[in-house]
Image (spheres, helix red, strand yellow):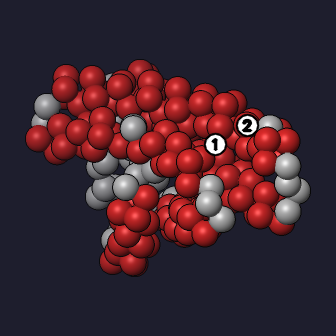
Amino acid sequence: YYMVSLGYYWNMTITHFFQYRRKDSSQLFVHHLLTILLISFSWAVNFVRIGTLVLVVHECGDIPMLLAKICKLCGLQRAMDGFFLMFLVLWLCTRVGLYPFWIMRTTLFRAHVILQMWYPVYYIFNGLLLVLLLIHIMWTYLILRIVVRMLLFREISDVRSSSEASDEDDDDA
């Protein structure tokens, strides 16, 4: 699972240059590079347990997000709304709840006591996790803008798009 995820993020990084540009293209590219660094670094220093936990927490919202995109392309509005709501709940619970308040709290404040270390590895790993959290905060803002548009105007459009041609409903986080 770990190495398959690493391969997937390498693929996403390489194909990033062949996709149309969005407002958050640079954040998405940084996210993919950061994920490659986190997976590789955690593998090298034997932090695979925490790395796997971070991956699972991040990937559980991807399925409803992609299903919402498919439903939008197929014109299935009610199904899209349902999958988007599922994605929103999962995003908020995992990336805004579990990740910072459980996983990061543990790695920042308890891991050094349990592992009895204050080596550079500890700081590098937590620094990478903090950058990932900053990207989550930016994307949460964009997702909440989509929700506000949906509630006020009953329209869903990708707030990341730099042109009117794109019509996706949320980000590839």
Which residue is under mark 2? 106
Residue at (23%, 31%) from the top-left corner? 80
Characterize the local packing of mark 1: few (<14), some (14-19) or many (20 or more) Cα atoms within 10 angstroms. some
Residue found 85% across the figure and 42% down from its top = 113
Q: On the rendered structure, is 128 left or right of 111? A: left
Q: Up-down: is 88 above or below 131?
A: above
Q: In this view, does 65 lie to the left or right of 98?
A: left
User: Where residue 126 sits in the image (x, y, percent)?
Assistant: 74, 54
Q: Nearer the viewer, residue 97 or 30?
A: 97
Q: Hey, which quadrant is residue 105 in on the image?
A: top right
Which residue is painted at 50% across and 48% down in the image? 52
- Helix, strand or loop at label 2? It is helix
Q: Position of residue 46 (x, y in %)?
A: 62, 60
Q: Which residue is drawn at 29% across and 58% down?
A: 165
Instruction: Residue type at mark 1: give it.
Output: Ile
Q: Disc 2 residue type?
A: Thr
Q: Mark 1 points at which residue?
A: 137
Front one among 30 and 41 = 41
